[in-house]
Amino acid sequence: MADYPTHIQIEPHIHMIRGANDARFPEANTLLIDDEILTLVDAGSHPDQVFSTLRDLGHQPEDLERIILTHYHADHKGYAAYLRSISECEVLCHPLAKEGVESFQAMMKFIGINNLETKEHWLNLLQARLPHVQEDYIVDSTFLDDKPIDCGEIQLIPLHSPGHTHDHTCFGINGLEKVLLVDIDLTEFGPWYGNTVSDIMDFKKSIEYIIDLQPKMGISSHLLDPVTENLAEKLKWYLEFFQKRDEEILHYITAGINTISKLAQIPIIYPRIPHPAYFIFEELMLEKHLELLSKNDLVILHDGQFQVLRA
Ligand SMILES: [Zn+2]
C-alpha cells in the first residue's frame, strides 16, 4: 500500500481516492461521490484503494452504482470493467469518448497507433502495466456538456475541455468553485497532447476557459493534493509550457536538429523516453508544434528538414 492516506475528503460527500505510485501514470486519482447515487468519477486508482475507501465510508465494493469517465485514456477508464463486474454499476462518458472507451481498436486509433512496430511496443507496454484495459467495454449512457449530473446533494457539471484529447471533460462540483481538472493536471511534466485526437490550440483554449471560471480549488488526476493556493498562477504557468516548447524546438532546429525523429531523440517534451512505446507520443507532440510553427511562418519544411524562418 502507498505510504500516504488512501483518500481525503474534499467536502461533505466528496472524497478523492488517490492513485497508487503517487498517482502517476498508469495510475490516476478518482473521485468518490458518497451520495444518494454512489458514484465514482474515473476508475484509474488501483481497486485496493477504491475498496478500502468504500469500506472506510461504510460501503462494500458491490454498492457502487455509477462510474463517470472523464475521457477514454487507459489510466482513467482504468478498472471500470472490473469494478462493474463486481457491482453491476452503470458507466457513463462523454459522447465523444464512447467509441474509445468501448473498443480497444478505437482506442488504438485515437492514440494514433498506425504501424506494426509501434503497435508491438504499445501492446508490450499494456501487457506489462495495463493488462486490465484490453477488454472491450459497454458504456450505458452518455452525459451532455454543461448538463448537471445529479448525485443527490452533489451536482457534477460536465465542462467539455478538449485538447488533451477530443473528449476530455473537467467537472464542476456543485458549481464552479471546485473543479476536477483531470488531465489539465498541473504536474511538472506540463500539458500532454500526444494522441492523434489531441490538439494544442484546443488545449490552450480549455486552460484559458478554466482560468476564466476562476475556480478556488482544482483537483488534478495526477497530483496527490487538490490545488487551492495560487491556482490561477499555476494554470497560467501550465499554459506557458506550449510557448516554452516552441522556443526549445526552434532552438534545436537552428542548431541543426531539424527532423521530427532527431528532435524526438533528444527528447524535447519528455524529460526522457521511459519506454520505446512513448516515442510515438513525443513525435506526435512535436508534429503538432511544427504544424503550428509552419502555419505561423516560423519554420519551413524543405527536403524533409525544418528550417527556422524567424525565431
Ligand atoms: Zn489522459
Image: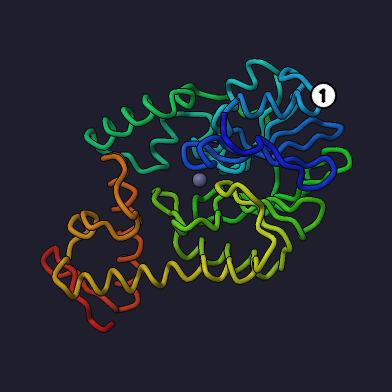
Q: Quick one: SS at disc 1?
A: loop
111 vs 153, left or right, is: left
219 vs 56, left or right, is: left
At 44% from the left edge and 28% from the top edge, which residue is drawn? 130
* Image quadrant in which the N terminus is located: top right
Name of the residue lying farthest toward the bottom: 310
In-front residue for pair 62/294: 62
* Location of residue 126 with respect to 265 vertically, above or below: above
Name of the residue lying farthest toward the left: 303
* Location of residue 135 with respect to 24 vertically, above or below: above
Task: Give the image quarter of residue 78.
Answer: top right
166 vs 118, left or right, is: right
Residue 190 shows in this picture: yes
Q: Position of residue 305 (x, y in %)?
A: 14, 66
Task: Give the image quarter of residue 243.
Answer: bottom left
* Image quadrant in which the C terminus is located: bottom left
